Image: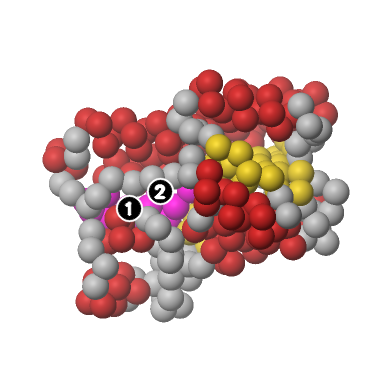
């Protein structure tokens, strides 16, 4: 029960890594608010773990502000997990449409600014809080044809470190986790197509020989957001089976 008595928001918590984080947090005693653009997915996970579901478009300031008002109106928040993310399909960098670029920018990068603007004042007032950004090995060891996705995750890692430095005097810790590709709704988008041959090629780059799982992310996230990690801030932890070695 490492998170007993705490309340957390997990964006993009209706599926994939976010759902794994939400499940682990709840198992460790946390009250979890599952925020997702897909309210049906969010409600399914919330019902499973005894949490609360909220619909939120993390790329939209008004939607994030509404989420913050709804959550903070019900009580204090201890943990914010910025998990929601998207990618563009594998493509030469110059062939990615402006629309796809803007969407990656808004969901993967602008959302971190919007949630910080909405929740950091609350954390500062309480002189404590934990923020976890779900980045990617793509921000550390980028692969060709996912250029703008790679860049967005590199931005998130840098944002994590600068947030950690600025917010440390207020007792707020900020960390990131870097998963490798996993069994999530985004896997097919990363690979371009899902075939046994493509999967084998992907897995050959991971020394431990398997994809990241939602459970892997939940375990790492739980540690970084718990009081056991009270001396850890500004870290981008690779949860990648050795992919970045």
**Quadrant showing the N terminus:** bottom right
Residue bearing the label numbered 1: 142
* Residue 206 location (% of width, % of height): 39, 72
* Residue 175 location (% of width, % of height): 61, 45
Q: Residue at x 56, y 28 (%)?
A: 64
* Residue 118 location (% of width, % of height): 63, 24
CB of mark 1 within 8 Å of CB of mark 2? yes
Q: Is 136 one of the magenta-colored residues?
A: yes
Picture disc at residue 121? none
Asked whether 21 or 124 is in front, the reply is 21
**Quadrant showing the C terminus:** bottom left
Left/right of residue 208 with respect to residue 102 in the rendered view: right
Asked whether 245 or 109 is in front, the reply is 109
- Residue at disc 1, secondary structure: loop
Q: Is 103 one of the magenta-colored residues?
A: no
Left/right of residue 99 with respect to residue 20 in the rendered view: left
Q: Residue at x 76, y 40 (%)?
A: 78
* Residue 198 location (% of width, % of height): 24, 71
For residue 205, above or below residue 159: below
Picture disc at residue 139? 2
Label 2: how many Cα within 10 Å (few below 14, some 14–19, many 20+): many
Q: Main secondary structure of the magenta part?
A: loop
Residue 238 is at least partly visible in this image: no
Residue 101 is at least partly visible in this image: yes
Magenta stretch, residue numbers? 133-146
């Amino acid at each position: 029960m490492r998170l007993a008595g705490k309340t957390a928001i997990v964006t993009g918590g209706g599926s994939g890594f976010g759902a794994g984080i939400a499940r682990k947090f709840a198992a460790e005693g946390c009250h979890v608010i599952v925020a997702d653009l897909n309210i049906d997915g969010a409600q399914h996970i919330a019902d499973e773990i005894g949490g609360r579901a909220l619909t939120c478009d993390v790329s939209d300031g008004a939607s994030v502000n509404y989420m913050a008002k709804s959550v903070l109106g019900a009580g204090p928040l201890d943990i914010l997990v910025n998990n929601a993310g998207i990618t563009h399909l594998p493509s030469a960098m110059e062939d990615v449409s402006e629309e796809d670029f803007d969407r990656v920018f808004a969901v993967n990068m602008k959302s971190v600014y919007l949630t910080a603007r909405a929740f950091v004042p609350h954390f500062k007032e309480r002189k404590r809080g934990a923020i976890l950004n779900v980045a990617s090995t793509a921000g550390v060891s980028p692969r060709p044809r996912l250029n703008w996705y790679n860049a967005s995750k590199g931005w998130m890692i840098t944002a994590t470190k600068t947030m950690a430095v600025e917010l440390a005097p207020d007792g707020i810790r900020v960390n990131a986790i870097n998963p490798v590709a996993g069994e999530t709704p985004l896997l097919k988008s990363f690979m371009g197509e899902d075939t046994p041959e493509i999967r084998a090629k992907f897995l050959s780059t991971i020394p431990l020989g398997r994809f990241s799982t939602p459970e892997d992310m939940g375990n790492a996230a739980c540690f970084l957001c718990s009081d056991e990690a009270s001396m850890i801030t500004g870290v981008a932890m690779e949860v990648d089976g050795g992919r970045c070695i």
